[in-house]
Amino acid sequence: MTKINNICCIGAGYVGGPTMAVIASKNPNIKVTVVDINEERIKAWNDEDLTNLPIYEPGLPEVVQKARGKNLFFSTQVDEAIAAADMVFISVNTPTKTYGKGKGMAADLKYVELCARQIARVATSDKIVVEKSTLPVRTAQAIKTILSETGNGVNFQILSNPEFLAEGTAIQDLEAADRVLIGGEQSPEGEEAIQALVNIYKAWLPEERILTTNVWSSELSKLTANAFLAQRVSSINAISELCEATGADVGEVAKAIGMDSRIGPKFLNASVGFGGSCFQKDILNLVYIAKSLGLVQVADYWEQVIIMNDHQKNRFAEKIVSTLFNTVADKKIAFLGWAFKKDTNDTRESAAIYVADKLLDEQAKITVYDPQVKETQMQRDLNYLQSRTEQENKENLTTTPDAYACCQEAHAIAILTEWDEFKKLDWQKIYDQMPKPAFIFDGRGILDEEKMKNIGFNYFVIGG
Ligand code: NAD
Ligand code: UDX
């Protein structure tokens, strides 16, 4: 039986870092080396001061502290780590393509392919290669082709082991995973490789939560899971607009439908729109695959989830403009939150970026407070859209490290992220420091509507 003593993970990002930290902490006899070409990121992973880790994730510093320097290492020496490993995880980014065929839809697999080529070039002993990145169905075939034609006599087994962690709860999701999915080749060698990975997860998870499938089912399950989750958010967001037009309350509707055990209560929070690095990218990828296979109705069905999400972000921005007497030009709008959800410093595809972009088009002056996101990141997010010059973005969107300063003298407050600390703010004090009428646009439904109205705010909540 293959026994794994040495793991290399290529990609020290939001998945590679936390996943390997947990694997190392639960398997003290396995040496785990996480490598990345980004020197700054690796330096931050190795920082003595655990508050400087590149990822903000509750519980992560404790897990890193437990294993780092013992059996968990972060390094830029990619070739060396690959050569020494029995098992290599590929956990690099697979963003939506921004060029060529499939632009704006297909997953860009160039980073994954580069990893496969690097493994092929460096390996001198047999290895199990694990796809941890989210990949289109049948990608394992491409990786296998690259690896099997090296002609150097090294054998590779390819496994698909998609990651289901959500940011902000990554450690909890990894330590108490609902399930782990491992897809592998249906052959004795494939079974042996699957078992080697099962044994790693078995160190802390009950065996019945470790599902094994063929590679293609595993790859497709990951895209499907994200599509279903995002679809729930778009579904409740569609209902939120209907609620606003009819006097129904989306929170009450969500509770009522969620008590049906077939529907369930989770993932039914109406919001300003889902963000994050996965949902949009993975659905676009699913749509692209369906289109490529000529499955037009399937593609159209899933594309609607994205269309609804874009609509939700737009209509939130439009609501702000129309409520503020059809103009926000030169008005101060305070943004509470920039991250795509609470308890993360990740801003990829955050709704805040798109709402800000729309309001900047209307010449608003935006000030942002987010407890974990740096100003440089916010500017990078806005500049990426290329809607105006970098200088204009800098002048018209500023940040402050204090929520009260952010809201002072603001014509309106928009809540973009559901950080717990926003609920605990002294809202009377905030009201007193704003010109009247004072508006709140609660894009996350986190404040007490009656309390806000009693203070004197004009309070608008999604789906209320
Ligand atoms: P990320 O951008 O945070 O990290 C990827 C890292 O890979 C980067 O640090 C990059 O420098 C590094 N990298 C790229 N090419 C490399 C190479 N050739 N050699 C060494 N390092 C290289 O991305 P992420 O959020 O960790 O996502 C990784 C994969 O996991 C994606 O496919 C994503 O879809 C999937 N995923 C992400 C999440 C999530 O919540 N972020 C959850 C589940 C699955
Ligand atoms: C998601 C999947 O949940 C996870 O399994 C996968 O591995 C990666 O993609 P993530 O994007 O980190 O995780 O966070 P998630 O909690 O799914 O939230 C995604 C977005 O949906 C956030 O913007 C969140 O605010 C929004 N959301 C979520 C809602 O608007 N309403 C909800 O009820 C739930």
Image (spheres, helix red, strand yellow):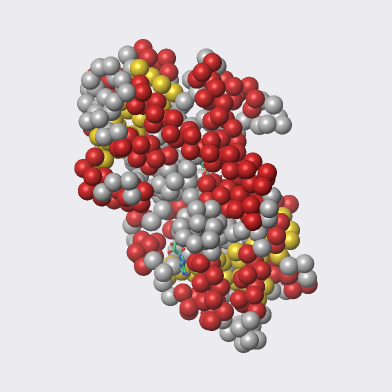
Residue found 54% across the figure and 70% down from its top: 113
Instruction: Give coordinates of residue 99: x percent, y percent.
Output: 46, 60
- Residue at x 66%, y 47% (from the top left corner): 296
Residue nearer the viewer, 11 or 81: 11
Q: Residue at x 58, y 48 (%)?
A: 283
The one nearer the camera, 304 or 142, is 304
Kindly identify the residue that appears in the image at 66 percent across and 69 percent down.
Answer: 141
In this view, 100 is above or below 444: below
264 or 310, nearer to the observer: 310
Task: Say left or right for 356 vs 365.
Answer: right
Where residue 134 appears, as percent x and y from the top left, is: 57, 57
Q: Residue furthest top?
A: 454
**Residue 23 versus residue 142 in the image, above or below:** above
- Examine the image and state in which quarter residue 243 appears: top right
Instruction: Relative to 378, say whether 356 is above or below.
Output: above
Give the x, y percent position of residue 304: 58, 39
Instruction: Specify whether residue 166 is in view.
Output: no
Whether residue 260 is visible, yes or no, is yes
Q: Position of residue 267 (x, y in %)?
A: 58, 35
Residue 89 higher or lower than 284, as above or below: below
Query: How many numbered marks appear?
Result: 0
Q: Quadrant of the N terminus?
A: bottom right
